[in-house]
Each structure stands twice: as structure tokens, then as C-alpha cells.
Image (tube, grey):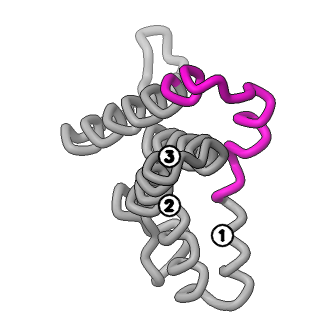
């Protein structure tokens, strides 16, 4: 709280972000925008994109078992390796649906990184590799 000259108090909120955090969030924006642009260039349905954008978050169901199972399921669904593998295999096999799903999945991960959600530690749901949320 700060006190003004008139004697009233005001609150001041300063958000400080480290350079690595800023770079990781900008990287998330780049991943999201790139995946969405490639998805659009492939003629993917906007409705399907919106409908499936949050599908990777279904992995949070693992937290109903315990913290370790939840973090493992969440991390598998939120690491870039898995959708990139799906995209690569889909390109190799000529599987358009797999390509589109991989791009939506990749966009989701980029979106999460943009807002500061990272891979989870088994200690608590809010403990991530980017920050504590």
C-alpha cells in the first residue's frame, strides 16, 4: 500500500518477469501462432480447432489417482515431443487427420506456455518448470 499526499491509501501492483520467463512465454506465442497458421494453411476446420484446443487438459484426470500419476499424465500430454512425433508420422504417412490433430495439440502447448503453464512436478499441481502458478 502506498500513501498519497492527500492521506488516502492506494494499492500498487508491479508485475516483474524474469528474462527467461519472458523468453519462454514469447516462445509459447511463436509455437501457438505457427501451429495455428499451419493448421489454417492445411484447410483445417476452425470449429474443430476450437473444439479440440483444450483436449490435452483431459490428462489432468490422472490427478484423481495421485500427484505422481497426474504429473506424469499431464507431462506426457504437454511435452512438445509427442505432437511433433504425430505431425512427423502423419506427414510421412500422408495422414491429414493426424497432422491436424498434432497441430492443434502443439497449439495448445504453445498457448499454455504463453500464459505461464509448464510441465508439472509431482510435489504439487501448481509446481511447474516455469513457475509456481
Range of residues picked out in magenta: 37-56
In the image, what residue occupies the spot 77% across and 36% down?
48
Which quadrant of the view contains residue 21? Answer: top left
The residue lying toward the viewer, choosing from 9 and 77, is: 77
Taking the magenta stretch, the answer to whether it contains residue 51 is: yes
For the residues labelled 2 and 3, say whether their Cβ atoms are less than 8 Å apart: no
Between the C-alphas of marks 3 and 1, the distance is: 15 Å
Residue 106 is marked as: 3
Residue 45 x, y percent position in the rendering: 74, 28
Which badge, 2 or 1, is on the more N-terminal residue?
Answer: 1
Which badge, 2 or 3, is on the more N-terminal residue?
Answer: 2
Local secondary structure at mark 2: loop
In the image, what residue occupies the spot 74% across and 84% down?
64
In the image, what residue occupies the spot 54% across and 18% down?
8
Q: Name the residue that disc number 2 marks.
A: 78
The residue lying toward the viewer, choosing from 1 and 52, is: 52
Which marked residue is nearer to the observer: mark 2 or mark 3? 3
The residue lying toward the viewer, choosing from 45 and 19, is: 45
Local secondary structure at mark 3: helix
- Give the main secondary structure, helix, strand or loop, of the magenta stretch: helix
Between the C-alphas of marks 2 and 1, the distance is: 9 Å
Q: Name the residue that disc number 1 marks.
A: 59
- For residue 52, above or below residue 26: below
Taking the magenta stretch, the answer to whether it contains residue 55 is: yes
Amino acid at each position: 500500500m502506498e500513501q498519497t499526499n492527500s492521506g488516502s491509501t492506494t494499492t500498487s501492483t508491479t508485475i516483474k518477469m524474469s528474462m527467461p520467463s519472458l523468453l519462454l512465454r514469447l516462445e509459447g506465442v511463436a509455437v501457438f501462432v505457427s501451429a495455428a497458421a499451419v493448421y489454417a494453411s492445411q484447410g483445417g476446420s476452425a470449429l474443430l480447432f476450437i473444439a479440440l484446443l483444450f483436449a490435452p487438459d483431459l490428462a489432468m484426470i490422472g490427478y484423481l489417482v495421485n500427484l505422481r500419476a497426474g504429473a506424469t499424465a499431464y507431462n506426457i500430454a504437454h511435452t512438445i515431443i509427442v505432437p511433433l512425433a504425430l505431425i512427423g508420422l502423419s506427414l510421412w504417412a500422408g495422414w491429414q487427420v493426424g497432422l491436424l490433430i498434432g497441430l492443434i495439440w502443439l497449439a495448445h502447448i504453445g498457448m499454455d506456455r504463453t500464459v505461464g503453464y509448464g510441465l508439472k512436478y509431482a510435489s504439487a499441481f501448481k509446481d511447474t518448470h516455469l513457475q509456481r502458478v
